[in-house]
Image (spheres, rainbow, N blue to C red):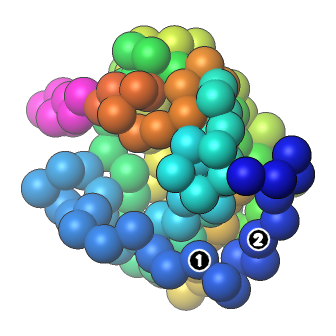
Amino acid sequence: MADSFRVGIGDVPAVPGLGPDQGWVGMTVQFLVDATAAGSEHVVFGRAVFAPGHAEHQWHRHPGAEEFALIVRGQGIVLDGDNEIPVSAGDVVFHRKGAWHGFRNTSSSEEAEMIWGWAGAASRAEAGYELRHPPKR
């Protein structure tokens, strides 16, 4: 494998099989850089697009990875523990390893897009994934 890796967003299909039963509601996800595609050892880099009308990645955590995200377009709510933090294009969010987090698109007419990454893991399996059902309000 080469020392460097290049890929276009349009060249990577959405990850199949990510659905509401796993906390992925109305969104598409692409894994752009990871161990399988790029031979990375400690990083996953991806893109998520959230449909208008309350698409969300429900509360979850990764015991094996920190997560960061850049909101590229749109707006939403970052779920942080039991808190909800408004964000919009240009905001960067960071979640410590094992912290409960998620995201919800709050626009009824516009998509929200984020570029995200995991540090400390090169695959979804290494990062770990645990879904937490939201508290009753």
Pointer 1 residue:
12
What numbered label is drawn on residue 82?
none
Locate residue 133 relative to residue 44 in the image: left or right.
Answer: left
Q: Position of residue 74 (x, y in %)?
A: 70, 68
Q: Is residue 79 above or below residue 12?
A: above
The quadrant holding residue 113 is bottom right
Q: Residue at x 68, y 86 (%)?
A: 10
- Along the line of sight, the residue nearer the viewer: 68 or 43: 43
- Along the line of sight, the residue nearer the viewer: 15 or 37: 37
Span of residues in magenta: 130-136
Q: Are marks 2 and 1 in contact (CB under 8 Å)?
A: yes
Pointer 2 residue:
7
Q: Position of residue 51 (x, y in %)?
A: 46, 78
Query: Magenta segment, principal secondary structure?
Result: loop
Q: In this rendering, does residue 25 appear at all?
A: yes
Is disc 2 surrounded by few (<14), some (14 to 19) or many (20+) residues within 10 Å? few
